[in-house]
Amino acid sequence: MTEVGVACNNSSGGAQLTPEEERVLIRDIAITSESKSKEGDSFYLITQRWWQHWIDYVNQDQTNVTNDGSSMLENCDTVSSSKRPASIDNSDLIYDVNSEESNVGIEIHDTLLEGRDYVLLPQEVWNQLSSWYGGGPALPRKVISSGLSQTEFAVEVYPLRLQLLVMPKGDRCAVRISKKETIGELHKRACEIFYLNLEQVCIWDYYGHRKHALMNDMDKTLDDANLQMDQDILVEVHDIANGGLSASKGASRGCSAEPSQSPNLTSQGPNLTYQGRELDNAYGTSTVTTRGSSGGLIGLQNLGNTCFMNSAIQCLVHTSEFAEYFREDYHQEINWKNPLGMVGELALAFGELLRRLWAPGRTAIAPRQFKMKLARFAPQFSGYNQHDSQELLAFLLDGLHEDLNRVKHKPYKKSKDADGRPDEEVADEYWASHIARNDSIIVDVCQGQYKSTLVCPECNKISVTFDPFMYLSLPLQSTTTRSMTVTVFTCDGSALPFACTVTVPKQGRCRDLINALSCACSLKNSEELKLAEVRNHLFQRFLEDPLISLSTIKDDDHLAAYKIAKSLKKTLLLRLIHRCQEQETGDTKAAQKLKPFGTPLVSLISHDDVITRGDIQKVVHTMLSPLLRSESLRQADIPEPCSSLAASDMCHNSSSDEACTNPVSNSMNKDSSGSRAVTLFKLPLQLVEESNACIDLSVGEDKTIKLSSTSTSMLVYVDWSQELLEKYDIHYLENLPEVFKYGPVNKKARTEPLSLYTCLEGFLREEPLVPEDMWYCPKCKERRQASKKLDLWRLPEVLVIHLKRFSFSRSMKHKLETFVNFPIRDFDLTNYIANKNSTQRQLYELYALTNHYGGMGSGHYTAHIKLLDENRWYNFDDAHISPINEEDVKSAAAYVLFYRRVKTGDAISNGENSGTGHKNGSSLK
């Protein structure tokens, strides 16, 4: 780690490096820096345009490498050809640099996206690039703690921009400050800007131009105080005569520069009454109003990556039950004192926005006030980054429910175990308990109930519960299987490495993967597979326990399987790690360092007899023999079975062929191979002893290796020189594929759409719990990996279905572009209801959906909505609304589906069996 920093200092003062040297050095610095990242560190924004130019430049000599742009380090492996970039130019990220003022610094545009507009570089990487290329301006940002537990780190690209308003003078000024700074620091900054003394001022949370709270806890962070972007802060001066308040001094600090820097902000003057009117009219107008047009066709302006919010809002606004409810007097149902709610503010903001969207005309609305309320109560949606519309939808439904909960004092209800009682009785008991604590328009319309059954695998204890749901999240891939790609290596030199993709149970175990691989690679009875996870060219772990859950293997992991011979003899596992020399940059006489590369290999070596250095040389020669180039084979005059690469290819195509039995490569029998290959040239091998000392195996061929009787393995390094690299074709050891690589949808997936019914069946299918979510069996008194089965029991009036297009791995978030064939009419769920006493037909009709187009980060959300009054579908794309044909509603972009129950004339009400007394109990049955 220390060597990287030294390399930086040396390189900056030396001759210009080659593109490859720049690439390697930046890669090493980045890996070192990111592994040590901590709160308070600085990262620098650099324009994506310049960064991509540099990537192309340093990778112009790279071959056979792909890039999906998912991370900075992966970007260092892009193939292209380019000239050396000019100086760094971040001008496209910022407003006019000439308008910089001390209180806010250089302002970046409000709608920038990481990966599309800029890349975040560790400070050390920025310093190195800046020393090579110069330019700028530098745009540093701090690492802060985030998340509910405050244990995650994030770069604060957009620190808080607060509008300081001095009363009674009326001066105002914008200031940039981290949300992790304290209220005391905000006091200090305000006094510096307006030339005030700390004793003179009180600072108020002036959100919505109302005094919400006196900010006098000097140690409290602005984040904990729930301050939001562009929020007003009232600086109240108690003693103006002695305070020295000066408008001219305040102006000299550049307080009037903020509006010109950020054109998206409303022009702001000192008049409070004027500002109040502006806030009241914050929704604004942008086009000419068309009077007399149909209601419900008003768009929402995009405030900067707010399409995720706009699409979700439009679907909720066009849910007829909500449209009717919020256009009437709903204020009497607001629960002002619910500690789980938002003091009614979210419901009021949503209700006001809904009324505006159902007003006559077509003028698009800018939902600034709603977004400010949203960010105030859900900071995760603050700022101008793209977010998940389904996550927002979940928050809105839950938040609106709590704000409108008719239950003012929630009674304590203890759930009872079923204990063999009829499901109908237990389900009604659970539902009654739920309604006693949760009763709102959201529950009336959107909440259903499912049955959850857990079975202990040891004692067969059955636990049945009935839980409410607001929406169903359906998987798009099969819930029972997953594809896994593993690279198979033969340790006897009989074949070249090859990638093998198999299908295994999603909740399976390592033995399932090994069995599938054994069949796929035609494993002989005399062979077995050793499975390993490889990371950073080293063995991360050997997957030797057959009961290891496959869920612990992530899609972006790299796996290797090694064919080794079964043996009754006492053997040692030889682990072979490849290393190559890297010249330290900046000093041509500097020592060369060895770094791991490629895929490590394993083999077995007999421990019954004495092991010599020559024995290890022979085993390694055997392991590497398929990689020998043809010229090297001819020069070495290896015995006939290894005389050409064609023989290796033949072994690869027919693993059961006798040609795969190579007399040179039998690592279990030291006498079965001739000594010619071993004596031709010595490989530069280093054996790591138990004391961590290294033994040179290229000398003293007959010397005995001393091993303890308890040794089970040995570690050997092969140090590849340029001369040795010319003898072997080592590209087979490079670019170990990921377990599952996300890519474009194949033709079969496009032509054979996945049915929504299939997704639902996958959701309801019985599965074992993942190891991280073990169930505590009350009978065994231990945590067990129980099997879980879900069944639909009670369906809501409006059924919201979330298609799980986004999946997570260790370092990335992927999107599935699977086309789902969902019904627009006659979505029949009757046969999926476990409540057999329900005689009502469960028919649903689609009336709205959100769509997500593009990839992660730079994607775009829209909504398709059917206006019931017109019986016509429309596309809501932010402020733009256009009619569409019904056949265009279905696409691979569909993300969240909204279904409304169809009223059937012959349906038999089941209200008398609900047992809840709730007015909508039957409709939710």
Image (cartoon, rainbow, N blue to C red):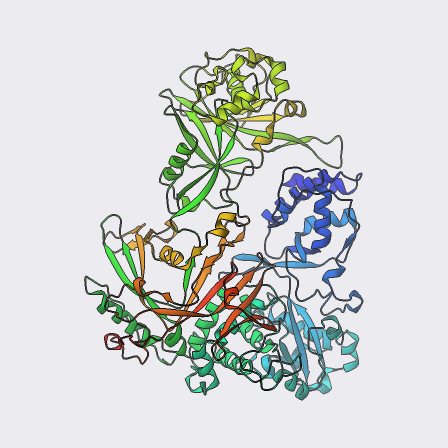
Please state if 625 lies on the left or on the right of 255 as rendered.
left
Q: Position of residue 246 (x, y in %)?
A: 76, 82
Q: Residue at x 62, y 61 (%)?
A: 156
Q: Is residue 900 visible?
A: yes
Dividing the picture into quadrants, the one containing residue 385 is: bottom right
Q: Is residue 339 visible?
A: no
User: Where 687 falls versus 675 (above or below)?
Assistant: below
User: Where 815 falls versus 850 (above or below)?
Assistant: above
Query: Dividing the image into 4 quarters, which one contains the C terminus?
Result: bottom left
Q: Position of residue 157 (x, y in %)?
A: 64, 61
User: Where 46 falls versus 261 (above or below)?
Assistant: above
Query: Depth check: 274 or 794 in front?
Result: 794
Please state if 510 lies on the left or on the right of 9 as rendered.
left
Query: Dividing the image into 4 quarters, which one contains the N terminus?
Result: top right
Q: Position of residue 362 (x, y in %)?
A: 60, 80
Q: Please give the count of numbered marks on the rendered protein.
A: 0
Q: Position of residue 739 (x, y in %)?
A: 49, 42
User: Where 502 falls versus 324 (above or below)?
Assistant: above
Q: Residue at x 23, y 65 (%)?
A: 423
Please state if 654 lies on the left or on the right of 55 as rendered.
left
Dividing the picture into quadrants, the one containing residue 198 is: bottom right
